[in-house]
Image: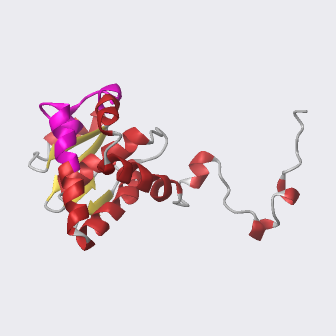
Amino acid sequence: MVTIYDARLSRRELPKRGGIGALLVISGSAVISPENAWGLETSALKPETMATLIQMARDIYPHDQVPDKYYAIAVKGHDEQAGKDAAYKTMIEDGIANLDKKSGEGGYRGLGWEEQRVAVLQQIEATPFFQSIRGGLVVSLYNQQEVWPIFGYEGESYSKGGYIARGFDDIEWL
């Protein structure tokens, strides 16, 4: 679960709230995870939009063992594309606004349960906005070499002698 808090928290309040899930702080034009020491600076999209995209990415492709920073890296391309294409930026910002509206008070990030967020995503899954986010994640999330070991993928095998010499025919279970 990703919880977004405003950057105006006191120094004493921040550690208290850090234990309730992943903590993302929105500050200026950045989304920051002080607990895990990473940040994502935005250039075209609002940082609130990026924080929602991170949560949305986690809900579309949920992997508890994958840290939020890899989801942030995966959605960063939408910020870059929005900087080049005004129509794309409008689609993303309007899509997030619609998602927040359908989620009720507190918006999408304010929904406390994954099942609630998934139900809202199912309402918009046929939209170009959702399909753009989902389609981009297939490549941008799973093509990060840093996440491959989490899934047990060793990468390409050609440089290591190919699959045949590295366990392809190890069918001991037969």
The part of the image, by quadrant, that contains residue 60 is top left
Highlighted range, magenta: 95-117
Image check: 172 left or right of 91? right
Q: Is residue 14 left or right of residue 140?
A: left
| Magenta-span inclusion, residue 138 | no
x 26%, y 28%: residue: 112
Residue 75: image location, x then y, percent: 35, 57
**Secondary structure, magenta segment, majority class:** helix
Which is more toward the observer, 25 or 134?
Answer: 134
Q: Is residue 102 magenta?
A: yes
Determine if residue 76 is in view.
yes
Above or below, 63 relative to 113 = below
Left or right of 6: which side holds 121? right
Q: Is residue 44 visible?
A: no
Name the residue located 30 percent from the left edge and 33 percent from the top edge: 123
- Coordinates of residue 64 in the picture (x, y in percent): 46, 38
Say which residue appears at 49% left-offset and 41% top-offset.
65
121 left or right of 62 in image: left
Q: Position of residue 69 (x, y in %)?
A: 38, 54
- Quadrant of the frame with the N terminus: top left
In front of the other: 34 or 140: 140
Q: Residue 122 sits in which quadrant?
A: top left
Find the residue positioned furthest to the bottom.
84
Q: What is the x, y in percent for residue 116?
A: 29, 27
What's the residue at 22%, 40% (across, down)? 99
